[in-house]
Amino acid sequence: MANYFTYLCTDCGKIYDATEVRYLCPDCSAAQNPEMPPKGVLKVQYDYTAIKTAYPTFSELKSRGFIDILPIKSLSSFPRLSVGETPLYTYYKEELFPFAVALKDDSHNPTFSFKDRASALVSAFAKENGLNTLVAASTGNAGSSLAGMCASNEQKAIIMVPEKAPLAKLTQILMYGAKLVPVKGTYDDAFDLSIKATEAYGWYNRNTAFNPLTIEGKKTVSFEIYEQMQGQLPDFIFVPTGDGVIISGVYKGFEDLLQLGIISKIPILVMVQSEGSDNLVQNISREHFEIKPSNTIADSISVDIPRNFYMAKQFLLKYNGQTLCVSDDEILEASKVLSKKTGIFSEPAAATAFAGCMKYHQNGRIDSDQKALVLLTGSGLKDLKSVQGIIEMPTSVESDLEQLNNYLQ
Ligand SMILES: *Cc1c(COP(=O)(O)O)cnc(C)c1O
């Protein structure tokens, strides 16, 4: 059953055989307006009835490594590095908040961000299809992730980044041996160049919401949440959002479980954006898409044109998702609280989700008998500069007890 899938265009509803197309819906993407989010992002679909008959329970699917609901032939195509299966920490009522909260820490992935879930699947698909050179345009994490996965899977990676990506992420890309191409201009300029290069050189492109497998890789987090919470899904899941691929991936994972009759209801997903980069949240209710240039410390979710806008909006409306924006100050505060109270040091984009949960608490939007989950998508070590303003490096003392005594006063 593995590897039988089709693509559904989320805009026009057309269905494509998986051998027919690789990226966007050819019809919907034919006349793209560069000032608008792209149309024609594809969604992977399986023969749910057949899968349900063959493997009626979650544990049967799990025991087969979910291969029946992944668009690849064999689990052995994945990079050797262990992706996913990240820890979920449960805090009972009153431990962190007046309600129970679970933290899913995806900084435990090999390149320290959630992006590995997508890169691993893209790398596996490339391996099965004889595609040896992979390219991605990225603000940092997707690129460092693809570089790491390719290093692990004997593939060549070419990573195009806007010039100002954080140093740690650029360093990772170089250390993993990828070809790093800083592109003058913004992420959108890097994105455009990577697509032109894909066409010109026949590389395989991992760009988010361009390659439909990015969503498919990201959905695995929902299977883990279901398993780690023993089927007792939370009432709210806070998801940090830029392009809207992670949140669509989370929805897609739950939707698969819904189609397979494993769950009967999808939790309320709360899309959290930075006030400085809120083009997805703000445009959901607008008739005409308007772009506000983004400016936020949370570089991983700093996005002018959300690449997966239409699909994310569709999911959110279909499953009654909610939206919320938090300021850079709230993100920094959340980052501090999270680090101090849990020992999890997250990058600003990830702390954005925790800031969203704190704000929901402050606004009394979560009852004491409800449960929340916060998706922590990346490590704080990836961007040390952004927190410099909220810490103070102490000066040194002589190795002398008296001096230490004064120092401690
Ligand atoms: C990419 C990323 C996000 C946002 O994901 P989108 O799919 O762009 O919405 C959030 N946090 C981190 C750490 C990321 O790298």
Image (spheres, grey):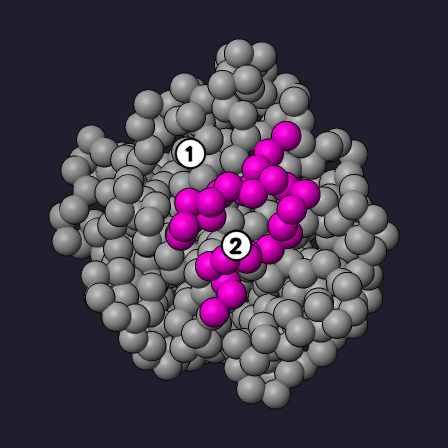
The residue that disc 1 covers is 254
- Residue at the outermost left position: 364
Q: In this view, does 183 lie above or below 42?
A: below
Describe the element under mark 2 as helix, strand or loop.
Answer: loop
Left or right, residue 130 beside residue 314? right
The secondary structure that dominates the magenta segment is loop
- Screen quadrant of the N terminus: top right
Residue at image location 71% in from the left, 68% down from the top:
199
Q: Give the x, y percent position of residue 154.
A: 85, 52
Percent x, y of residue 306:
42, 66
The stretch of residues the image draws in magenta is: 4-31
Outermost right residue: 154
Q: Which residue in the protein does label 2 denote?
A: 25
Q: Report the front residue among 87 and 22.
A: 22
Numbered disc 1: secondary structure: helix
Give, as a three-letter code, the residue at label 1.
Phe
